Image (tube, rainbow, N blue to C red):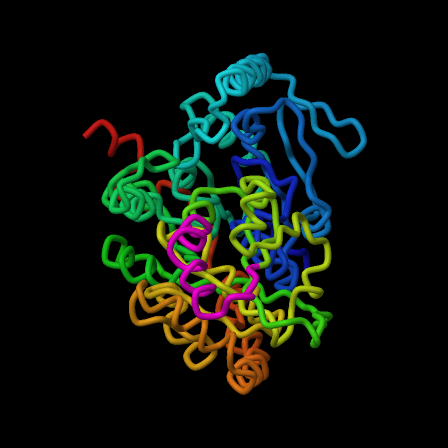
Amino acid sequence: MPRRRATLIVARRLDAMGEGSNSYLKPYLTLCQEAGLSTRLLFAPRRSFGNRAWARLHPDFAARVDSVDWPQTIRLGDVWISLSPEVWVRCFRRAGAEALRRLRRKTKISHPSALGVELSERETRDVARRASAEPIDLLTVEYSSLGPLLDRIDAAKRIVFLHDLFSLRAKSFQEAGLEPDHAAITVEQEAERCSAADVLIHASCTELAQFRPMLASAKHIWMRPEVIAVREKGDPSAAPHGVFLGSQHAGNIAALAFLRERVWPRVRAQVPDAELWIAGSICARIEPAAARAEGLRLLGRVDDLAVLGGKQAVGLAPMLLGSGIPIKVADYLALGMPVAVTPHVLAPFGNALEGLVREAATEAEYPNEICKILTSDKIRQEMSIRSSEVSARLSNEVVLSEVADHAFEWRSKSSKSPRNMSEYRQS
């Protein structure tokens, strides 16, 4: 029997695994493999390059797909180079803008992001035509910004894979008094983008609950984050300390600023010698002199996260902007750490992690909760032991069942809904 054909369409670079969104995309592709699908990874030809004109595909993604389709490119070894003048012009403009930012010492101001912006009509047509060149049993598009493609491509089952709802993400930024780092839309607009989907896969129970009433006829599934497989290598003789892992994006930047300004000084007032170990590219935002004064240990990039784990390391996951933090909780637990979070961080997990994590009642109580864990060997030991339950609690059998389902019959896009997305935009 021939293998069923799956196509995953993306519009971003996939050359690094440090991003939180890739912590969901990689296991999704793994589940497609386990379901016996032959998967084609299709890149939007121009948007996917971001602000460069060349890109690599991370080996973890390459190993989980049967083919990579990146139109309007030439491949040299493991590098895809764009043949689009539009991409090269954007690349040079970005290089010039970056040079000006450095000259003006404005390097901490973020560049405008295309995250959440729909593809242009021309690129939408290009992607739809390329995708339709071969039959598709399971079509998945990443983010609501690619949802409008579903109406233009024949497939037996259509899925929108939602790492974030841009409408709710924007709201969390605005409530914090910040400008969203992506295109802001309303929840109604975001739902309309996804109106042709049979299934919506969410990375958050909270977002699922808020979005389901908007698209009640579609099936909504929670995609649990992948639990990293590690053997703890942390030093059991190390003094108890906090740990914060992070790349440089708005959610992590806000969380780290909160730790440095409002949490860690209060922790050190109670536990004077306490250190906060910081790993990942976000270390570049901290001056070494400031780190020494604040009791921070800057580790930079850590290739083997297992060395950070164990009961002496307390994983810290405060969330201010509703983005980029919940995935840390799963990573910390997988590393055998006790974990302390601010209010609402566990909401995206529903009740799946109940009893495994200490959640402060208020942000003001967060430093005290951390101190209780740092100063009690018994609490740290018990929490570290219980952390081993995380793999079973975050199983993705439901998602596997959905992508392995053979029940859908082939149908044309005209049978999907009474009006397609282009008709909606004209109404």
Q: Is residue 45 magenta?
A: no
**Residue 400, can we see it?**
yes
Q: Give 361 or 205, whichever is nearer the viewer.
A: 361
Q: Is 164 situated above or below 395? A: above
Residue at 58% across / 35% down in the picture?
A: 43
Q: Residue at x 28, y 46 (%)?
A: 176
Q: Position of residue 109 (x, y in %)?
A: 44, 29
- Magenta stretch? 255-276
Quarter of the image that includes the C terminus: top left
Magenta segment's dominant SS is helix
In this orientation, which residue lies closer to the viewer: 387 or 418? Answer: 387
Q: Is residue 390 left or right of residue 198?
A: right
Residue 219 appears at what percent x and percent y? 36, 61
Which of these two is toward me, 397 or 7? 397
Tell me the quarter of the picture where residue 284 sits.
top right
Q: Is residue 423 left or right of residue 100?
A: left
Q: Which image quarter is the N terminus in? A: bottom right
Q: From this viewpoint, is residue 162 visible? A: no
Q: Residue furthest left?
A: 427
Give percent across and percent down for residue 376. Answer: 51, 82
Q: Position of residue 413 (x, y in %)?
A: 39, 42
Left or right for 249, reference 34 = left
Residue located at (46% from left, 51% from top): 256
On screen, residue 418 versus residue 46, left or right, reads left
What is the quadrant of residue 283 in the picture? top right
Considering depth in this image, is 10 or 383 the residue closer to the camera? 383
Compared with 133, 293 (above or below) is below
What is the number of callouts on the image? 0
Picture residue at 39% right of the left edge, 32% below the top: 117
Residue farthest toward the right in the current orientation of the protein: 77
Residue 217, placed above or below residue 186: below
